[in-house]
């Protein structure tokens, strides 16, 4: 492919429609892809940016069973939520499709039939896990068990989410059915396989040689590990009743494996888009002057770098991806984002709490993007970046410029007058930024690129602070005009350069400055920032000021933390194992227990014991020593004088050389804290029996 491709085909990982999308999806895949696509369009490039809902596969059927609805109802529900979230956050897909669409079913079926007719598959009868109770074979996520590599006891049949290893369901240790919980048996079934081992020489040359230097380390490393381990045939069909029926004889009850079907969704989405546009789709997938890019998360590297390219190579007429800039994972407040545990920030819920602040989240997620390692999203960092950077730097500069322009010149851009050396140097620095930002974007360093954008705003703030037009307006009117002219050029540059990163802010700023609008005919492009001496001309009238960003208050952040606390508590309650009932005791057994009201009158820590306190308790009968394992929950000082329930006729027991003459009754709350079984009631005295 030439250095300057004729067109770009940009794909973003197809989200599963078994739930909404969260900030991990946005940070890892969709914002980076959108920044890149928007940037290339601003260069005047021919771009097809496609995605779509991945609506087949076991997670869909599991969700349907759980909610008591059909798989189609599941995908219809979540496709609508996901698509709206992408639109709200400005993810500028040229087409967002669905893998349940007819055009996709036809495309995937034709792809399979071509490979099948050319003998590219091998047919094998293999033993697969079968659930006799459910009367069905167990594909991938219908099986859970112990990962053979890391020992995670909740690994799926196709991949371990703990260590990221891909495997077959039959590799699991102690597998069980996710449908019924039964232990599955092995049963013979016929499937079609893509012999990946035949493509090892091609993959070694294409990845390990051609892309050794330009692919990200995490992508190259994972691919090399797989190839070095030796590739094996991979099934492209499954025994399921939800999916694309296998277009072959003797394939009743079988569908295309979701990882054969899903990446073909990029092709069908491009076909659908091209048809609407009256274009030919083939150049976007078959012309060597097209740059094909897959934006994904690290858990999809193998499928996009080894399996899908092998499929494309087997078909023979398609180009291969130029790059697969996969990101690592984003955690939330120190813990892994989990859909099942509701440990996530859902995009549609974010907008309910922070309406019209899509760009704030885009900015924070890009600033903290997991480009080279897993990163952590915290609400404290979210607030700080908004208040200290977007509000205090970007927003402050624009507010100063627009307010002063209206205050001094009724919103009319003043003439530049005589430019000083600092003016000339400042404008030259601004004109250098497009190339700097472009270099970072082209290397998929979006965090770095956005930092350079913010440096333009920092430059503007420093320029105004140094030149102090609010002072010179009283002493040197012409100098003030020059300063405000220069400041408006910087503001115009920000309006253009911010578009890939902060599209809603860019649009709002352009409206304030009245650039790129029909009535002014003052359209500006990315290249203009680098080449034009004047971006906004003298005499041009700007609109009145609007705040681009607003401060986020502590109360808003606390509300988000309260949400997470509630989720954490709900998970702890759900995961708590209730102690089974003990053996039945008789009434006579129960009457032997002598429980009395007592008061702790002394308490001290047991030497060299982490959990034990030595207590002196007034039981009303006597003052006795009781050793209690509550030192991790209470200090000695805070329990002196505490009323407690004491089992006084428990046989004495020596603990670390101290004889304990009874037991304090406690209970444990869902969050793990201990509380006393409290006898504090008016009129109750030490020694009173508890019946």
Image (cartoon, grey):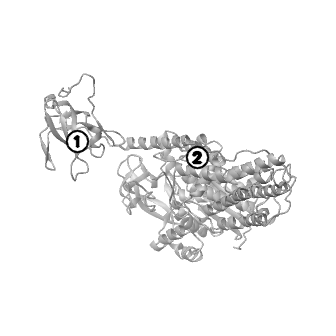
Q: Position of residue 578 (x, y in %)?
A: 31, 40
Q: Is residue 689 above or below residue 271?
A: above
Residue 556 is drawn in which quadrant?
top right
Q: Position of residue 190 (x, y in %)?
A: 46, 60
Q: Position of residue 134 (x, y in %)?
A: 41, 46
Front in this rendered view, residue 77 or 430: 430
Please tell me the numbered disc located at residue 347.
2
Q: Is residue 405 left or right of residue 184?
A: right
Front in this rendered view, residue 326 or 372: 372
Front in this rendered view, residue 672 or 261: 672
Does dot 2 land on a helix, a strand or a loop? helix
Q: Is residue 4 above or below residue 351?
A: below
Please tell me the numbered disc located at residue 249.
none
How far apart, in angstroms, are the residues tagged by discs 1 and 2?
51 Å
Q: Total of numbered circles in the picture?
A: 2
Q: Earlier in the sequence, mark 1 or mark 2?
A: 2
Q: Is residue 316 visible?
A: yes
Q: Quadrant of the N terminus?
A: bottom right
Q: Quadrant of the C terminus?
A: top left
Residue 466 is drawn in which quadrant?
bottom right
Question: Which residue is label 1 attached to?
Answer: 603
Q: Position of residue 78 (x, y in %)?
A: 58, 44
**Residue located at (47% from left, 50% from top):** 338
Q: Residue furthest right?
A: 539
Dot 2 crowding, Cα within 10 Å, few <14, some 14–19, many 20+: many
Front in this rendered view, residue 30 or 463: 463
Q: Is residue 61 left or right of residue 611?
A: right
Q: Residue furthest front?
A: 475
């Amino acid at each position: 492919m030439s250095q300057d491709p004729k067109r770009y085909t940009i794909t973003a990982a197809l989200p599963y429609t078994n739930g909404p999308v969260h900030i991990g999806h946005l940070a890892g895949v969709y914002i980076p892809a959108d920044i890149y696509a928007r940037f290339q369009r601003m260069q005047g490039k021919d771009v097809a940016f496609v995605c779509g809902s991945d609506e087949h596969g076991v997670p869909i059927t599991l969700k349907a069973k759980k909610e008591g609805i059909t798989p189609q109802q599941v995908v219809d529900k979540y496709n609508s939520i996901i698509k709206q979230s992408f639109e709200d956050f400005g993810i500028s897909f040229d087409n967002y499709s669905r893998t349940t669409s007819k055009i996709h079913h036809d495309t995937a079926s034709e792809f399979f039939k071509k490979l099948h007719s050319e003998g590219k598959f091998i047919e094998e009868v293999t033993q697969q896990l079968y659930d006799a109770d459910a009367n069905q074979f167990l594909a991938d996520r219908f099986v859970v068990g112990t990962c053979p590599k890391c020992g995670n006891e909740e690994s799926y049949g196709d991949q371990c989410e703990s260590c990221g290893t891909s495997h077959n369901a039959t590799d699991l240790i102690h597998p069980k059915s996710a449908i019924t919980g039964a232990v599955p048996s092995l049963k013979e079934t016929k499937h079609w396989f893509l012999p990946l081992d035949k493509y090892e020489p091609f993959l070694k040359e294409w990845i390990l040689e051609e892309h050794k230097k330009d692919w990200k380390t995490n992508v190259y490393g994972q691919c090399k590990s797989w190839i070095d381990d030796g590739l094996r045939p991979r099934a492209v069909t499954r025994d399921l009743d939800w999916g694309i029926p296998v277009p072959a004889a003797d394939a009743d009850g079988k569908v295309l494996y979701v990882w054969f079907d899903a990446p073909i969704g990029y092709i069908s989405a491009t076909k659908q888009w091209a048809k609407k546009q009256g274009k030919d789709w083939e150049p976007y997938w078959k012309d060597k002057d097209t740059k094909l890019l897959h934006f994904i998360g690290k858990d999809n590297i193998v499928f996009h770098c080894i399996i899908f390219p092998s499929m494309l190579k087997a078909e023979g007429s398609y180009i291969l991806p130029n790059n697969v800039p996969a990101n690592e994972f984003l955690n939330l407040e120190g813990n892994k984002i989990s859909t099942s545990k509701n440990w996530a920030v859902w995009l549609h819920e974010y907008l309910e709490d922070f309406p019209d602040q899509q760009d704030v989240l885009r900015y924070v997620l890009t600033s903290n993007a997991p480009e080279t390692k897993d990163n952590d999203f915290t609400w404290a960092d979210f607030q700080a970046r908004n208040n200290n950077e977007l509000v205090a730097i970007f927003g402050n500069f624009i507010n100063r410029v627009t307010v002063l322009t209206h205050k001094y010149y009724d919103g009319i851009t003043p003439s530049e007058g005589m430019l000083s050396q600092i003016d000339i140097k400042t404008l030259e620095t601004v004109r250098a930024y497009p190339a700097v930002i472009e270099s970072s974007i082209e290397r998929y360093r979006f965090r770095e690129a956005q930092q350079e954008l913010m440096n333009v705003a920092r430059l503007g703030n420093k320029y105004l602070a140094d030149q102090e037009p609010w002072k010179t307006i009283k002493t040197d009117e012409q100098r003030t005009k020059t300063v405000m002219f220069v400041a408006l050029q910087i503001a115009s540059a920000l309006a253009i350069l911010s578009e890939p990163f902060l599209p809603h802010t860019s649009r709002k700023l352009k409206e304030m400055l009245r650039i790129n609008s029909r009535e002014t005919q003052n359209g500006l492009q990315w290249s203009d920032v680098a080449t034009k001496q004047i971006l906004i001309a003298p005499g041009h009238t700007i609109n009145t000021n609007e705040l681009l960003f607003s401060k986020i208050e502590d109360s808003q952040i606390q509300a988000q933390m309260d949400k997470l606390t509630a989720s954490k508590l709900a998970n702890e309650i759900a995961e708590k194992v209730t102690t089974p009932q003990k053996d039945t005791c008789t009434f006579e057994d129960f009457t032997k227990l002598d429980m009395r009201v007592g008061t702790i009158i002394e308490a001290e820590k047991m030497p060299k014991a982490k959990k034990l306190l030595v207590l002196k308790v007034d039981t009303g009968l006597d003052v006795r020593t009781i050793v209690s394992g509550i030192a991790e929950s209470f200090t000695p000082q805070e329990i002196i004088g505490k009323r407690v329930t004491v089992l006084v006729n428990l046989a004495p027991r020596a603990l670390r050389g101290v004889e304990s003459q009874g037991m304090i009754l406690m209970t444990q709350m869902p969050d793990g804290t201990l509380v006393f079984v409290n006898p504090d009631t008016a009129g109750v005295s030490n020694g009173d029996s508890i019946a």
